[in-house]
Image (spheres, grey):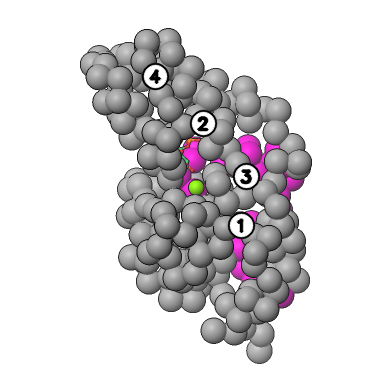
Amino acid sequence: MALKKGFIFDLDGVIVDTAKYHYLAWKKLADELGFEFTEEQNEMFKGVSRKRCLEILLDIGKVDATQEQFEKWMIEKNEDYLSYIDKMDESEILPKVKKVLKYLKKKDQPIALGSASKNAQPILEKVGLISYFESIVDGNSVTKAKPDPEVFLIAAKDLKTKPEDCIVFEDSVAGIQAANIANMISIGIGDKNVLHEADYIFKDFTEMNKKFLKKLIKK
Ligand code: BG6
Ligand code: MG
């Protein structure tokens, strides 16, 4: 019988580089509120829910908000973000991601998405990857944010795979911690100094060969 694992992909920063659009949308809001928001500060926003991002942003700018303003700014930021998403197409898929997805499909491996984003579904549709995913667990389906393992545990359940047989691809520290807490194999995509808690780290998918993927399936 063929070996089956559960492969769980984060979206932003793993499949597509949407961090730049999140940054532009948050920066626009910061500009409007009259303070600076840098790309370095944007690093703290990776893997973090929209609500938590706004809380951090307002802390940075030392801005107090009423509940009403808070809700309004969340909507404003998302509308601005969606104007970038609207223009996305296949060309925005990060290098070799499609090749990895294709390889896993060929090997009959179940694939899920495990993302904090509430915009995951439209993004996967825009870039034409939605058909690769048997399950999409996103910001609309979870109550607890990464590093809580909820998002990955739901994905494992959907794929009918035990957590210890799941492999998670993540670009955020919170996401790697969530995968580790869930007792899954964590694969960091990005900077090895930032993602040092991961079981394996690759700069991007161009560094990952078939031999490595084969090993993961057989493990
Ligand atoms: C994560 C991103 O994937 O999704 C975060 O890394 C983002 O930066 C979060 O804040 C929520 O995204 P959205 O699309 O629901 O605002
Ligand atoms: Mg991410």
Q: Is residue 115 covered in magenta?
A: yes
Q: Earlier in the sequence, mark 1 or mark 2?
A: 2
Mark 3 → mark 4, Cα distance in angstroms:
26 Å
Q: Is residue 118 rendered to the left or right of residue 2?
A: left
Q: Position of residue 42 (x, y in %)?
A: 43, 34
Q: Which residue is mark 2?
A: 22
Residue that mark 4 sits on: 36
For the residues labelled 2 and 4, the Cα–Cα distance comes to: 15 Å
Which numbered disc, 3 or 4, marks the residue that appears first in the sequence? 3
Q: CA distance from mark 1 to mark 3?
A: 11 Å
Q: Which residue is mark 1?
A: 204
Of residues 18 and 194, the one nearer the viewer is 194
Ligand 1 within 8 angstroms of badge 2 C-beta: yes
| Callout 4: SS | loop
For disc 3, the marked residue is 16
Give the amino acid type for the residue marked by disc 1 in the picture: Asp
Q: Are marks 4 and 1 in contact (CB under 8 Å)?
A: no
* Picture layout, residue 143 above or below residue 180: above
Q: Give, as a single range, the part of the protein colored magenta.
A: 107-133
Q: Position of residue 73 (x, y in %)?
A: 40, 18
Mark 1 or 3, closer to the camera: 1
Q: Nearer the viewer, residue 162 or 36?
A: 36
Judge: label 4 CB < 8 Å from ligand 1: no
Q: Is residue 198 magenta?
A: no
Q: Is residue 118 visible?
A: yes
Going by the numbered disc 4, the residue's amino acid type is Glu
Q: CA distance from mark 4 to mark 1?
A: 30 Å
The residue drawn where x is 53% and y is 21% is 79
Asked if the residues shown at circle 3 and circle 4 are in contact, with their CB atoms under 8 angstroms apart, the answer is no
Q: Earlier in the sequence, mark 1 or mark 3?
A: 3
Q: How busy is the neighbourhood of tag 2: few (under 14 within 10 Å), some, or many (20 plus)?
A: many
